[in-house]
Amino acid sequence: MSGQSAIDHQIMWNRLLAVVEEQGQVLIRTAFSPIVRECGDISAGIFDCQGRMLAQAVTGTPGHINTMAEAVKYMLNRFPIDTMQPGDVYMTNDPWLASGHLNDFLLVQPAFLNGKVVGLTSCTSHLIDLGGRGMGPEGSDIFDEGLRIPPCKLVDRGEINQFLLEIVKTNSREPVQNEGDTYALIACCEVGCERLVTMMQEFDIETLDALAEYIIQTSYDGTVAAIAEIPNGHYPHQLMIDGYDFEIEINGSLTITEDEMVLDFTGSSPCSAFGINVPLNYTAAYAVFGLRCLVASDIPNNAGSLAPFKVTAPKGCIVNAQPPAPVAMRHTIGQLMPDFVFGCLHQAIPDRVPAEGASCMFDLPMRNVTALDVTDAGQHFAVELVHNGGTGARPSKDGLSATAYPSGVWGSQVEITESTAPLLVHKRELRMDSGGAGKYRGGLGQVLELTSAEDKPFLLFLSLERMKYPANGFLGGASGAVGIVELERAGELLPGKGEFRIARDERLIFQTPGGGGFGNPFERDPYAVATDVQHGLVSREAAITDYGVVLTVDDEVDIAATEQRRQS
């Protein structure tokens, strides 16, 4: 196709977006582990021969997507284009090159047309277990945390490296799931290559160069125009979070100019002795995602729309951990980065920024106590449940309840949990009064109760946030409820981080945090409060004390009493 117009380029761009979505669906539908198959902890994308991301699947998590956007460049430096052959697939799980911890595999495959590399496809997904101490914060360094694989060739001209795959399986408590997920990742890359080449043949193009320049320049220009609409300035902020061995200060500032946003974390706490430290690639992934949610959010994510955002942090601080720091639970802090940037942007555009949310997933890895507890294959398990709290209220809407923001990872389903692990779920419901009061209410957390389904104990690895410091409200909105983990029989509250042995007859109760409210609670529509009470989201007591709304015995609004209450 000669003399391609902007319309031609736009059609091909849309086609690429469809291709990456198909890639993502292939990965999800062929994966073995529930955290991929049921929760969507993945990414998929298409890149040009310079390693610039042209399209990424909407299905997926920012911790994989935005780290993948930079990781492909590293892989090209290690494996130059002119050394690649059809059928080659490259991979690594190095936290500082891929997506921040060992449990994520990043794959890259070249796409060939007429004997030449015309582009690359890439994908990432979470593998359930790679040995070591497993998915928990207790490791003292990266070597404690499992198998680390440097950039290497996973598939050589169509032949999988069986020796490497055997190493992965041998170092895992779930070898079958890991093998199946590895093949799912390969299939994801292969489908992306096939669809990319088919698209190029249909449009009669032999190179992506012109299309890539159109996508990147158009996206960059649109993003810069959106940045220019925000008041220039220097916006410092501090976010206090629970931490593990010490409470953590996330300090820094956002500098906005006409054409870029620079986020700097100077002044943040040093690294922890435990595995909650965050490599800078993962910090940047979620920080930029938070900015992109409010700036040019209608422009697809690619190298152009990401270019105006820069993230820096001093080496050795907790959001720029250096090897060999332990980083297994890097998402515990990393997923709070959007709340940090919201605190910065709230100073510039207060009417557009939502309140803080639960943010960090209530990630619940569990497994056998020791190998000696395994008497048959049916009792050997390692599982990672994902549950979410409430998001912060928005400037014109309530927050979302039990919703995965910013991770985008769907909550683990009860039926899948019970069918893949020896666990019995007794309750899963929304947590009343957990959303922060406001003109717009914060999203609610949830309550989950479970026990062992076998006559055996199991290990629980906690790395949770919002257990001490709640999600703050904005413009008069109240904070959301903090998270709670307790043992019912023992009457014991567990701390947010650590490794715990759960007795066979003990009931675990998880209460996830709520999001902060937005605006004065006494300005909330009384009828919205009554509806919340009727639906079991807000108690009658909270309706009166938090919102000043008096209800009749039938949970209808008593207008006169409410007006009097709110004026007193």
Image (cartoon, rainbow, N blue to C red):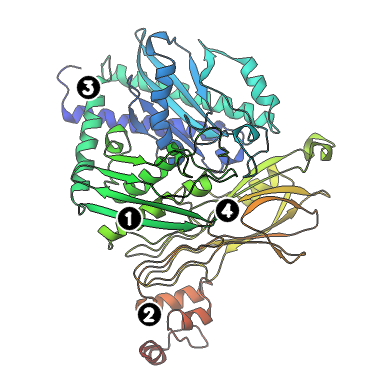
Query: As rendered, which of 360 and 212 lies closer to the eye?
Result: 360
Q: Secondary structure at mark 2?
A: helix
Mark 4: which amino acid?
Leu
Q: Residues within 10 Å of mark 1 (few under 14, many from 20)?
A: some
User: From the viewer's perspective, is 552 left or right of 297?
Assistant: right
Q: Nearer the viewer, mark 3 or mark 2?
A: 2
Q: Neighbour class for label 2 at 10 Å: few (<14), some, many (≥20)?
A: many
Instruction: Tell me the residue that label 2 is attached to.
Output: 522
Q: Quadrant of residue 508?
A: bottom right
Answer yes or no: do the residues labelled 1 and 2 have beta carbons within 8 Å?
no
Q: Residue at x 67, y 20 (%)?
A: 166
Q: Are marks 1 and 3 in contact (CB under 8 Å)?
A: no
In this rendering, the answer to whether 491 lies above or below 364 is below
Label disc, if present, on residue 464 of the rendered structure: 4
Tell me how far mark 3 sits from mark 2, CA to CA.
Answer: 56 Å
Q: CA distance from mark 4 to mark 1?
A: 26 Å
**Can you see residue 60?**
no
Amino acid type, label 1: Pro
Q: What's the residue at 74%, 59% (across, down)?
A: 507
